[in-house]
Amino acid sequence: MPAPVWLMIAAVVLPASYFAWSLISVDRASGRLIRTRLQAAAPRQSTDTPAGPTLVTRIVRRLTPNSYILRLDQTLAKAGRPASMPLERLLTLKPLAALGGGLLALLLGGGRSAPGMFLTLALAAGCYFLPDLLVYNNGTKRQARIENDLPNVLDQLLISVEAGLGFEAAVARVGASGSGPLADELVRTLQDIQAGRSRREAYRALAERSTVPDLRSFVGAVVQADIQGLAIARILKPQAEQMRIKRKQRAEEKAMKLPVAVIFPLLLFIFPPLFIIILGPAILNAIATFAGR
């Protein structure tokens, strides 16, 4: 099929795909959460019903396995559920990205032979899983920042509790004055408690939204102290000291790994040009000398 025909097909398919994506571009999950909390605060004054999923979203959900949707939702939870990429939008964006990658490969002449068809399928599959990779990368960076901020947050909580504040008041103070994903998670935990969730369930949900072992250990200690009725300051002090020691050990471990990581760039990018500069003239002179004989 000639290239102008593919261009005409792309001119029709791409705008239609963009229109379908724009239908689900509104973050309805946040809107539903806001409506739910407003109804809980004033149930008699709110009569609006949450907007349901669009037709495109329902079709994509039926075609996607439930286990894959659940795993993708967990990945979004670890990434902090960015407002620009809710689950419905991500599910609809993935097949559109695969369609766009396949059309691009076909426009470049990928469907004229068996290797070209394989390349087209590979590019479509890569574009389909590319949003997953981006969300997973954001989630990994976010969890690393939580792990790095945890010792400072525990120190602030310990200072606030020793100054006379309650644990929830200390958490609210740290979440309001702090910045970063860990402060956002603390604020969300307090919002869950204010919405009617029990303290233990809210803290356990905080641990489930994170892959940081230190944070899960801290949440487990807080829940255990709440069950046994222990003073929270007695729990925070050893936890803060332990987190500071672990952060120092992680920094020392990275410093020990640095020489090993520098070896490969030295061998691949620095030593070969150096050898060429030093030994190159000598080798050329030797070649010229032997050629002259």
Image (cartoon, rainbow, N blue to C red):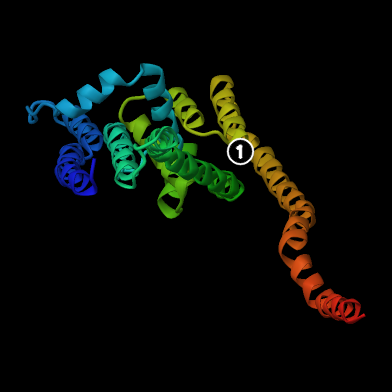
Work out whether residue 129 or residue 167 is closer to the camera in this orientation and state it.
129
Asked whether the viewer can see residue 189, the reply is no
Q: Residue at x 6, y 27 (%)?
A: 47
The quarter in which the C terminus is drawn is bottom right
Q: Residue at x 66, y 41 (%)?
A: 237
Q: Position of residue 119 (x, y in %)?
A: 43, 38
Whether 91 is drawn above or below 257: the answer is above
Among all residues in the image, which is located at the extreme front?
293
Work out whether residue 118 or residue 153 is closer to the camera in this orientation and state it.
118
- Left or right of 255? Residue 73 is left
Identify the secondary structure beneath mark 1: helix
Question: Which kind of residue does numbered mark 1 sit on?
Answer: Ala
Say how many tags the image has. 1
Asked whether the viewer can see residue 242, the reply is yes
Q: Position of residue 40 (x, y in %)?
A: 20, 27
Work out whether residue 99 or residue 164 is closer to the camera in this orientation and state it.
99
Question: Pointer 1: residues within 10 angstroms few (<14), some, or many (20+)?
Answer: some
> Which of the 4 image quadrants contains residue 82?
top left
> Which of the 4 image quadrants contains residue 265?
bottom right
- Left or right of 239? Residue 4 is left
- The residue pinned by badge 1 equals 233
Q: Position of residue 209 (x, y in %)?
A: 47, 32
Work out whether residue 253 or residue 44 is closer to the camera in this orientation and state it.
253
Q: Residue at x 18, y 32 (%)?
A: 35
